[in-house]
């Protein structure tokens, strides 16, 4: 479509400047200190929706951070695409490892550096700009609803409630999301699944107060030592997870599907080199692509306790804590896994300590079909703008609301992501290639066009 190309070319610089402005707002959902900034970001997103050509846009308050909803309805007989994304970002720390301010975006070597550049402001904003391209050239193929939330990074609890209460408003034919990654620009791909999540916090308590480690050490259990042993016991010598019944519901992939998964371009040496590790690690009997795509895992996200200030303090601490998360695959239930984790963790605690386990947010895994009209429209859109058919892959990350789009709204999702695995999302120096940003804006209108053309066929 020449009109789309021309409009994008003429407005290219502004499209980038507007994204940079959005990245300057520190919309960190996890930290209440940024509540005002999160609200300011929601307002900015709403204004952008209106400017792009939405008939209406609103900031919908929730018990937490607001949801921004906008729509452009052109004809009730045409299909409706519900675009989802998030404007909230992860905390930026550790700050000292950033080479420029996380909320002072800079462009270096064709890459935008800022918290949220890729996850997900850069990617969700492509949809608002793509909508503008289509609306301003009077070439919108279908109805579009856009829902951008502010709590994805903290579990989307209030969005789950919003779906329940707004089924009519959110009526659509498919959900379209750009919040995942591709193999590379040379090897475009589409993630056809997301893992689920169960996130736990544990606390091990020994003596009723911190003790002198010389007076009492050796005679009373040290909760840090005990916690480390308990955590270490959660994997066996083959790096299988040892929690009883953990794998019971895991669906084994057929040999043919495993073969297809492993045929995706992947260079183990480059992978190791890029991460600065001399060897990979993981569940015996599975490749790296399988370990991150189709197998459940258990990770310690943080561990603390005792004295960590300057110098040395001889102390036998009263408590030790850790945050532990498990990535889940289809058929595993987040609640069920949280429960069996809690049972197991309580059971392996030795006498002399007490254990408290609490569950944080979770979410279910999803598989998105690769034979649906929507997936095919996405594949054709990528083929049109990349000149290459995309490879279906399995992503390792989680977007908890996707399972609820299906359960609550009966909608399937297409994951049309343009990030790269090394975009440093959730890490210092998060980046998004300017090329990917423009490529996304160029590709998205074709999804709407091809989806509409295939609709009802
Ligand atoms: N966009 C990511 C998920 C993602 C990243 C999927 C890369 C596939 C490839 C999302 O913002 C995210 O970080 N989700 C969290 C879960 C949430 C409950 C905090 C995650 O995966 O840890
Ligand atoms: Mn995201
Ligand atoms: Mn994220």
Image (cartoon, grey):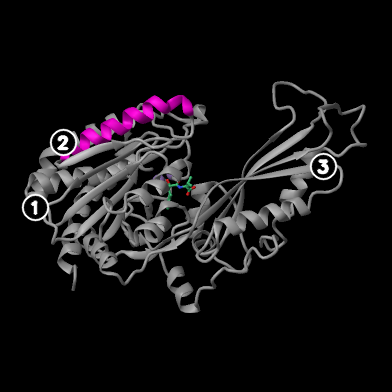
Magenta segment includes 38: yes
Image marks 3 and 2: residues in contact by CB distance under 8 Å: no
Magenta segment includes 304: no
Q: CA distance from mark 1 to mark 2?
A: 16 Å
Q: CA distance from mark 1 to mark 3?
A: 66 Å
Q: Up-down: is 214 above or below 372? A: above
Q: CA distance from mark 3 to mark 2?
A: 59 Å
Residue annotated with mark 2? 51
Residue annotated with mark 3? 353
Q: Is residue 153 visible?
A: yes
Where does residue 123 sit, x and y in percent of width and height? 31, 45
Where does residue 329 sit, x and y in percent of width and height? 52, 62
Q: Quarter holding the C terminus?
A: bottom left
Compare residues 415 and 108 and report the one nearer the observer: 415
Of circles 1 and 3, which is in front? 3
Image marks 1 and 3: residues in contact by CB distance under 8 Å: no
- Label 3 crowd bin: few (<14), some (14–19), many (20+), radius 10 Å: some
The residues colored magenta run 32-52
Residue drawn where x is 49% and y is 30% of the image: 31
* 144 sits to left or right of 120: left
Residue annotated with mark 1? 139
Q: Up-down: is 330 above or below 273? A: below
* 17 sits to left or right of 415: left
Where does residue 54 sit, x and y in percent of width and height? 16, 42
């Amino acid at each position: 479509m020449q009109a789309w190309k021309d409009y994008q070319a003429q407005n290219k610089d502004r499209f980038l400047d507007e994204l940079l402005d959005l990245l300057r707002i520190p919309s960190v959902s996890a930290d209440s200190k940024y509540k005002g900034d999160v609200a300011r970001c929601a307002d900015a997103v709403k204004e952008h929706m209106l400017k792009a050509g939405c008939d209406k846009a609103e900031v919908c308050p929730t018990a937490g951070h607001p949801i921004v909803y906008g729509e452009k309805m052109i004809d009730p007989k045409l299909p409706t695409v519900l675009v989802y994304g998030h404007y909230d970002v992860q905390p930026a720390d550790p700050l000292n490892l950033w080479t420029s301010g996380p909320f002072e975006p800079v462009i270096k070597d064709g890459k935008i550096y800022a918290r949220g550049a890729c996850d997900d402001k850069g990617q969700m904003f492509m949809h608002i700009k793509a909508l503008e391209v289509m609306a301003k050239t009077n070439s919108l193929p279908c109805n579009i609803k856009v829902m951008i939330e502010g709590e994805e990074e903290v579990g989307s609890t209030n969005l789950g409630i919003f779906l329940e209460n707004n089924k009519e408003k959110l009526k659509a034919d498919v959900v379209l999301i750009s919040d995942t990654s591709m193999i590379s620009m040379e090897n475009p791909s589409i993630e056809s699944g997301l893992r689920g999540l169960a996130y736990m916090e544990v606390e091990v308590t020994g003596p009723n107060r911190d003790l002198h480690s010389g007076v009492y050490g050796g005679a009373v259990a040290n909760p840090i030592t005990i916690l480390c042993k308990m955590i270490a016991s959660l994997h066996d010598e083959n790096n299988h997870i040892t929690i009883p019944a953990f794998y019971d519901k895991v669906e084994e992939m057929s040999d043919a599907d495993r073969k297809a998964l492993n045929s995706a371009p992947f260079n183990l040496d480059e992978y190791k080199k890029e991460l600065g590790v001399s060897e990979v690690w993981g569940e015996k009997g599975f490749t790296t692509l399988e370990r991150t795509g189709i197998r459940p895992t258990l990770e310690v996200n943080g561990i603390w306790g005792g004295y960590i200030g300057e110098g040395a303090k001889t102390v036998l601490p009263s408590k030790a804590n850790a945050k532990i998360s498990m990535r889940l695959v289809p058929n595993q239930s987040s609640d069920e896994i949280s429960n069996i984790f809690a049972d197991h963790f309580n059971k392996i605690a030795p006498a002399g300590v007490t254990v408290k386990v609490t569950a944080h947010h979770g979410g279910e895994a999803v598989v998105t079909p690769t034979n649906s009209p929507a997936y095919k429209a996405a594949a054709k859109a990528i083929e049109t703008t990349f000149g290459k058919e995309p490879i279906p892959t399995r992503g390792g990350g989680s977007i908890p609301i996707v399972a609820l789009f299906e359960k609550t709204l009966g909608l399937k999702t297409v994951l049309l992501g343009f990030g790269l695995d090394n975009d440093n999302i959730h890490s210092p120096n998060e980046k998004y290639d300017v090329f990917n940003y423009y490529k996304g804006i160029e590709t998205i209108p074709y999804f709407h066009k091809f989806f509409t053309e295939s609709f009802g066929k």
